[in-house]
Image: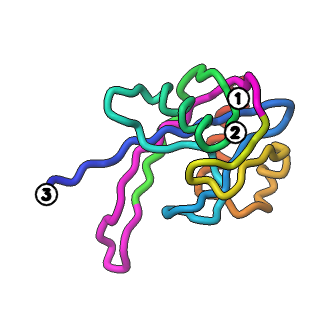
């Protein structure tokens, strides 16, 4: 069987000095906080995926604006063999409407002050702070 990386989109929404995060219910990173997102479906652009996943996971509506960064996520077993390989694409999204309400595969969805994320006192997925800083520089 040929193995290929999976492509995912992450919706980065910053509004009023807060950032929208979801708590994941599934692996990888179950229980950790990160940006709403998911797999790109056949025939769907990364921008469309970011908007759709944001709505499904949080009920928040936002307009995808531009790409922020690409993140390679490789997970290895104890012998160093790659178990999963994702290419995650961060998308800056402009908030339009809605209040966070966890849906789809999110345990929780909330706005967090940007400063709290920068302090790192929340259990988060890798590179959340890095991608947030990239988004803030692009504002």
Circle 1 sits on which residue? 137
Side (left or right) of 60 relative to 68: right
Rendered image coloring scheme: rainbow
Q: Give the SS element for disc 2.
A: helix
Circle 2 sits on which residue? 133
Q: Magenta span covers which residues? A: 75-98
Please give the name of the residue rendered at 75% of the width and 33% of the height, measured from the top-left corner: 14
Callout 2: 10 Å neighbours few (<14), some, many (20+)?
some
Q: Position of residue 26 (x, y in %)?
A: 53, 62
Please name the predominant secondary structure of the magenta segment in the image.
Answer: strand
Q: Give the SS element for disc 3.
A: loop
Q: Please, which residue is most extreme toward the left here?
A: 1
How far apart are labels 2 and 1 at the CA level? Answer: 6 Å
Question: Which label lies toward us, 2 or 3?
Answer: 3
Side (left or right) of 117 relative to 77: right
Q: Give the SS element for disc 1.
A: helix
Question: Which label lies toward us, 1 or 3?
Answer: 3
Most foreground residue, 131 or 92? 92
Q: Position of residue 121 (x, y in %)?
A: 80, 62
Q: Is residue 94 magenta?
A: yes
**Mark number displayed over residue 1:** 3
């Amino acid at each position: 069987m040929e193995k290929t990386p999976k492509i995912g989109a992450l919706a980065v929404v910053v509004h009023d000095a807060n950032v929208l995060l979801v708590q994941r219910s599934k692996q990888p990173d179950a229980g950790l906080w990160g940006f709403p997102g998911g797999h790109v479906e056949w025939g769907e652009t990364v921008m469309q995926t970011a908007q759709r996943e944001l709505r499904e996971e949080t009920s928040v509506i936002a307009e995808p604006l531009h790409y922020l960064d690409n993140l390679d996520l490789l997970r290895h077993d104890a012998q160093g063999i790659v178990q999963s390989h994702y290419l995650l694409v961060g998308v800056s999204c402009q908030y339009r409407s809605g209040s966070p309400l966890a849906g789809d595969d999110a345990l929780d969805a909330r706005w967090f002050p940007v400063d709290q994320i920068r302090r790192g006192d929340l259990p988060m997925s890798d590179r959340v702070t890095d991608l947030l800083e990239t988004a803030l520089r692009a504002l």
